[in-house]
Amino acid sequence: MSRHTPTLFLDFDGVLHPSHAEPSSYFCKMPLLTEAIGAFNVKIIVSSSWRFQMTYTEIKMLFPDILRSKLDGMTGDAFIGPHARWNEIKTCVRDRKIENWRALDDSFFEFPKSCDELICCEGGKGLEATQVSEIQNWLSEFQLSDIF
């Protein structure tokens, strides 16, 4: 995948499952993510704090095959300070020269208010149809403009 491929920075808690989910409900929203991006050419970079407790290989095994093939690493070291998640993502965007990206996250306070790239979930619910639609609209527009 190239730097031109759209990239989705993915949080887990509050996105792939409600933020206070029991372990038995972890990743209950994975089918919605699969629905949202399965048919698109998109990279996934894990921005979740789970990256500090698990190896990349372990994280990859949490995903179904169709999404596992889209995984392209994790953001780097933790940033200490305001808008930590946004700063971690921006460092990755800069280092990899990523041209088109979105962050799927529930922690709106981790991003500046002016961050148009944030697709925000409600942490107590996780990924829902509203965010699926936002993701699909973004990917459809990007990939249509890429054709013409």
Image: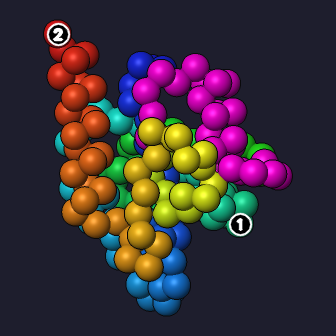
Indicate yes or no whether the magenta region holds residue 83.
Answer: yes
At label 1, which amino acid type do we have?
A: Gln
- Quadrant, the C terminus: top left
At label 2, which amino acid type do we have?
A: Phe
At horizontal 26% and vertical 55% (from top left) the residue drawn is 132
Q: Which mark sits nearer the N-terminus, 1 or 2?
A: 1
Q: Quadrant of residue 57?
A: bottom right
Q: Quadrant of residue 7?
A: top left
**Front of the two marks 1 and 2:** 2
What's the mark number on residue 30? none
What residue is disc 2 on?
A: 148
Residue 54 in the image: x percent, y percent? 66, 63
Q: Residue furthest top?
A: 148
Residue 67 in the image: x percent, y percent? 35, 50
Q: Quadrant of residue 34?
A: bottom left
For the record, the magenta segment spans 79-102
What residue is disc 1 on?
A: 53
